[in-house]
Image (cartoon, rainbow, N blue to C red):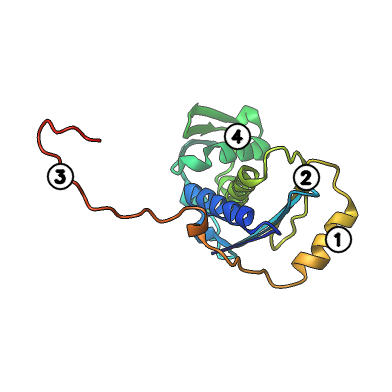
């Protein structure tokens, strides 16, 4: 994964790069992100960010997330074995089977009625892991967008998740300018590194203090 941040203010760009890397690390998605590219101009002001997620996202199968036990004709006890998917699965089943036929006994246990086993096994959950990743990436982006940049436009497509943000209304001309002057070329590396913001600590000889000696 590589993070590129471009700005006329390189120190500001470096600070944004370090923030982005920290957020990605905290959300544990570094292996799920290929590239992050950002452009910021505080004079305009405008902020652009795009994230390219990995395409190697395994599809989820029903057997990966549910155990199903038939208790009678059209009746099933269902356990959600991966609780992280519980909210999504419950919403999906309510949508597919109707709320009257899906009863939540516990957070991860459901009772289904008037349903065929085939319908359960054919639940459209293949993209669930991908959808989860997209949600986390959007969360990441909104943690990074500068405070006060409340005007946001979604520029995402099938290949990337992208947003542009500003304190002011965003004009089509501004989006076009970024496409023509930033995105049309390869990203540029910063000429400075984290030591410009976080100087290495000076190492000093360790002082051994004897009992009851004052430390000045």
- Residue 196 rendering spot, x and y as whole percentages: 52, 57
Mark positioned earlier in the residue sequence (1 or 3): 1
Quadrant containing the C terminus is top left
Please state which of the two labelled residues, at mark 1 or mark 3, is closer to the viewer: 3
* Relative vertical location of residue 159 with respect to residue 163 in this rendering, above or below: below
Query: Which of the 4 image quarters holds residue 215?
Result: top left
Q: Is residue 73 visible?
A: no
User: Distance of mark 4 from mark 2, alpha carbons?
Assistant: 51 Å
Q: Residue at x 53, y 28 (%)?
A: 104
Q: Name the side, left or right, on which 90 lies relative to 26.
A: right
Q: Which residue is mark 1?
A: 176
Tell whether label 4 touches label 3 (CB within 8 Å): no
Please state which of the two labelled residues, at mark 3 or mark 4, is closer to the viewer: 3
Label number found at residue 114: 4
User: Distance of mark 1 from mark 3, alpha carbons?
Assistant: 63 Å
| Disc 4, SS | loop
Within-10-Å neighbours for mark 4: few <14, some 14–19, many 20+: some
Q: Nearer the viewer, residue 199 or 5?
A: 199
Query: Which of the 4 image quarters holds residue 191?
Result: bottom right
Mark positioned earlier in the residue sequence (2 or 1): 2
User: Distance of mark 3 from mark 4, alpha carbons?
Assistant: 77 Å
Q: Is residue 10 visible?
A: yes
| Disc 2, SS | strand
Mark positioned earlier in the residue sequence (3 or 4): 4
User: Distance of mark 1 from mark 4, alpha carbons?
Assistant: 54 Å
Q: Which residue is mark 2?
A: 166
| Disc 3, SS | loop
């Amino acid at each position: 994964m590589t993070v590129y941040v471009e700005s006329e203010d390189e120190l500001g760009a470096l600070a944004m790069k370090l923030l982005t890397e920290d957020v990605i690390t905290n959300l544990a998605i570094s292996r799920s992100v290929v590239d992050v590219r950002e452009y910021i101009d505080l004079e305009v002001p405008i902020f652009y960010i795009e994230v390219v997620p990995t395409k190697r996202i395994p599809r989820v199968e029903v057997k990966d997330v549910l155990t199903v036990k038939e208790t009678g004709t059209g009746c099933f006890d269902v356990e959600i074995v991966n609780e992280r998917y519980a909210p999504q699965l419950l919403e999906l089943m309510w949508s597919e089977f109707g709320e009257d036929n899906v009863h939540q006994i516990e957070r991860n246990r459901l009772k289904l009625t008037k349903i065929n086993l085939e319908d359960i096994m054919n639940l459209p959950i293949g993209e669930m892991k991908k959808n989860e990743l997209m949600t986390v990436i959007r969360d990441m982006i909104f943690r990074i967008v500068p405070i006060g940049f409340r005007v946001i436009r979604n520029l995402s497509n099938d290949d990337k998740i992208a947003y542009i943000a500003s304190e002011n209304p965003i004009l089509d001309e501004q989006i076009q300018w970024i496409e023509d002057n930033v995105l049309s070329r390869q990203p540029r590396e910063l000429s400075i590194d984290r030591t410009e913001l976080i100087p290495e600590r000076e190492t000093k000889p360790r002082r051994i203090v004897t009992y009851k000696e004052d430390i000045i």
